[in-house]
Image (spheres, rainbow, N blue to C red):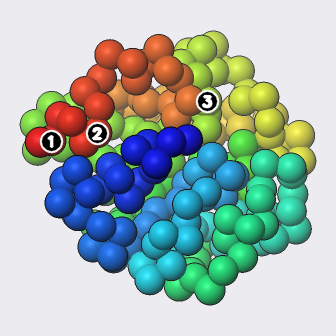
Amino acid sequence: MTEEQCLPARLAALGLSPKDTDVVFLGHLHFDHAGGLHEFAHADVRVHTRELAAAREPADPAYFADDFAGCYRWRQQHTGYHLLTGVRAIESPGHTAGHMSMLIELPKGAPILLCGDADLTENLEQEIAPGLCWRDKEDLALKSIRMLKALAKETGAELWPNHDTALFRPQDRFPDWHV
């Protein structure tokens, strides 16, 4: 990543810095989600208890111990929970032991269900487990995919898998849409 792509530069475009962040939500601790966590060591870091334990094993090669080995204010969660009004963390294990997704209710429009690494739209639509599953438990990943789809239907939410560039390419990009 270039410096301009890292979170401090993205926040600076909004007139903010990492120090303006009080809480960090981590859906899981793989390097592509927890890399850069050191910028937020001052904040409360919310992560599922099973996820932190799996990362410390490490349960698979996508955990980079350096990403979370610092002195952090871990706030371990044991179940789904409300992060704040209109934002709910949803347990969705399978890709990792303590994988979490996030349901966001917006002031206008449909809610968004950030599916984490359910992975791609095709994983959700065709109910295909992501390429990497915790301890090869594809059944657990598929159960979570089905649960996320049911929750989306119940709430009218749009499903947004993390790694589907075709989904994100046409979206307004942060922070450009905001300034």
Query: Can residue 29 be seen by looking at this rendering?
Result: yes
Q: Amino acid at mark 1?
A: His
**Residue at the image point whose x is 26% and y is 57% from the top:** 12
Image coords of residue 110 (percent x, y):
22, 31
- Which sits earlier in the primary sequence, circle 1 or circle 3? 3
**Residue at the image point whose x is 61% and y is 57% from the top:** 35
Q: Amino acid at mark 3?
A: Asp
Q: Would you say 27 lies left or right of 42 here?
A: right
In the rendered image, the vertical position of residue 178 relative to residue 72, given as above or below: above
Is label 2 in a helix, a strand or a loop?
loop
Q: Are marks 3 and 2 in contact (CB under 8 Å)?
A: no
Q: Would you say 61 lies left or right of 150 here?
A: right
Is label 3 in a helix, a strand or a loop?
loop
**Residue at the image point whose x is 28% and y is 39% from the top:** 174
Q: Are marks 2 and 1 in contact (CB under 8 Å)?
A: yes
Q: Nearer the viewer, residue 150 or 121?
A: 121
Q: CA distance from mark 1 to mark 3?
A: 26 Å
Crowd around label 3: few <14 · some 14–19 · many ≥20 (10 Å): many
Q: Which residue is mark 2?
A: 174
Q: Nearer the viewer, mark 3 or mark 2?
A: 2
Q: Which mark is residue 178?
A: 1
Q: Would you say 73 lies left or right of 13 here?
A: right
Q: Which mark is residue 119?
A: 3
Q: Quadrant of the C terminus?
A: top left
In the rendered image, the vertical position of residue 94 relative to residue 125, given as above or below: below
Is label 1 in a helix, a strand or a loop?
loop
- Which sits earlier in the primary sequence, circle 3 or circle 2? 3
